[in-house]
């Protein structure tokens, strides 16, 4: 329906479905190679998980009772109120699901609600998809997630440069780490060059075959590995809007939106992004990625460009795409000894050098002044104050 003006709600849903479907990637080369990848378990692999009444009740207690029901129509509020009665049956069902490596189709279906994110309301690309999935499935996912993170942490498998969705780490730890690097460079009388990278639709582009291989590489095998593979593949979604519903469409790639496991699965996918980096420091908050290095000489600049090139190779190998137009470069500290020439993208474009960037919600400058950030907060407060005052009679 490209280029056509549609007015019927059913057609609108199908048009949005086609738009979201176009965001997926497809890789059919490795499907045969992953069939037996979870066999041959070793002692330090996690091949199964503990499932009991307590684990299920803890997972239910973590739910938001006000969240909307998924395609199966079961609300979080119902599950929370009946958790003492349903925890044992759910534990039995989950045990069988793990043992057999099977998940019912309805638990892998997502209802997608389009949310306008700005721009023309007539363009499908200006609507962000928000997925609703089964709350019963989310209970199972929480049980898996807790034990999956425990396995990854105990075996030191989480990249120390990853600050997103990892217990004990956050945007604050990421920012503190970065600013400490900047101040350290300033104290040494050198400069710190940072390139802020931007993935294009990172969570939607994750290739299932590659992720499944990385699960095995991170010692996730046996029943659990096969169950996560089943969780990833043969998923479906429907767009729901104005009381109508699109046709069903297959989810061909990505970590499933609206699910509990999506974030940790993405972290596993991106965990080895710095495997071939020689000298630079790479830090991530989920897909928000930066690379930086103390630069004293022209040789240092070349070394940083070489490491950037390694990240570009990683992205190509892993079928991940960068949005090069959104790359930013910032230089902090002494600049006289080395030219401030731009670093290059994978396609050879200059990366724009900026004095001010917005980093994980904080506006900062290359002089480490936060005036712009403070001004933005003051402006936001004034706008809210004005809205409040307008609602009172004077």
Image (tube, grey):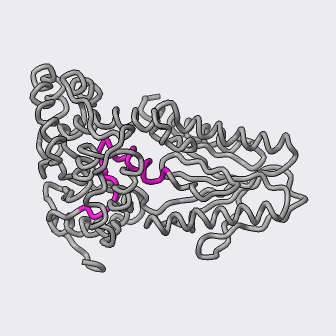
Q: Residue at x 56, y 66 (%)?
A: 312
Estimate the x, y position of residue 314 in percent, counting from the top left.
52, 63
Give the position of the N terminus as an image quadrant.
bottom left
- At x 84% / y 56%, what residue is drawn? 296
Res 337 seen here: yes
Residue at 21% across / 66% down in the picture? 12
Q: Is residue 116 visible?
A: no
Give left or right: position of 131 versus 184. left
> In the displayed image of the protein, which residue is found farthest to the right?
337
Between 226 and 352, the one lying in front of the other is: 226
Q: Is residue 33 above or below residue 112?
A: below
Q: Is residue 153 left or right of residue 352?
A: left
Figure check: 372 above or below 10? above
The furthest residue to the bottom? 3
The image position of residue 344, as x and y in percent, is 67, 70
- 343 sits left or right of 142 in the view: right
Magenta residues, as a range?
251-271
**Number of numbered discs present?**
0
Image coordinates of residue 256 in percent, x first then y, are 30, 52
Image coords of residue 340 (percent x, y): 80, 64
Q: Is residue 258 magenta?
A: yes
In the rendered image, residue 10 lying in the magenta stretch gets the answer: no
Q: Nearer the viewer, residue 187 or 19?
A: 187
């Amino acid at each position: 329906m490209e280029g056509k003006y549609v007015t019927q709600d059913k057609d609108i849903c199908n048009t949005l479905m086609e738009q979201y479907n176009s965001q997926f990637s497809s890789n059919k080369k490795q499907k045969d190679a992953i069939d037996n990848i979870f066999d041959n378990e070793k002692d330090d692999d996690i091949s199964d998980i503990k499932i009991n009444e307590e684990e299920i009740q803890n997972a239910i207690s973590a739910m938001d009772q006000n969240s909307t029901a998924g395609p199966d129509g079961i609300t979080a509020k119902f599950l929370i109120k009946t958790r003492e009665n349903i925890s044992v049956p759910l534990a039995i069902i989950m045990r069988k699901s793990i043992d057999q490596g099977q998940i019912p189709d309805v638990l892998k279906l997502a209802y997608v609600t389009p949310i306008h994110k700005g721009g023309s309301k007539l363009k499908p690309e200006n609507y962000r998809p928000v997925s609703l999935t089964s709350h019963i499935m989310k209970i199972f996912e929480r049980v898996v997630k807790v034990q999956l993170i425990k396995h990854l942490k105990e075996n030191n498998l989480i990249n120390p440069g990853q600050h997103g969705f990892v217990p004990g780490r956050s945007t604050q730890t990421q920012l503190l780490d970065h600013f400490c690097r900047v101040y350290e460079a300033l104290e040494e009388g050198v400069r710190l060059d940072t390139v802020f990278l931007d993935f294009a639709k990172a969570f939607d582009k994750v290739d299932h075959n590659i992720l499944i291989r990385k699960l095995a590489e991170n010692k996730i095998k046996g029943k659990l590995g096969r169950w996560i593979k089943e969780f990833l593949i043969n998923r479906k979604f429907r767009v729901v809007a104005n009381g109508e519903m699109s046709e069903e469409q297959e989810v061909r790639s990505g970590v499933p939106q609206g699910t509990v496991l999506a974030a940790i699965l993405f972290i596993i996918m991106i965990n080895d992004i710095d495997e071939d980096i020689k000298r630079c420091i790479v830090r991530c908050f989920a897909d928000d990625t930066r690379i930086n290095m103390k630069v004293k000489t022209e040789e240092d600049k070349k070394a940083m460009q070489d490491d950037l090139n390694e990240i570009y190779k990683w992205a190509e190998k892993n079928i991940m795409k960068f949005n090069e137009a959104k790359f930013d470069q910032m230089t902090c500290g002494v600049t006289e000894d080395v030219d401030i020439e731009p670093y290059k993208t994978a396609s050879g474009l200059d990366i724009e050098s900026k004095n001010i960037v917005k980093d994980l919600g904080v506006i900062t400058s290359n002089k480490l002044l936060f005036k712009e950030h403070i001004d933005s907060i003051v402006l936001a407060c004034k706008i809210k104050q004005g809205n409040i005052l307008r609602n009172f009679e004077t």
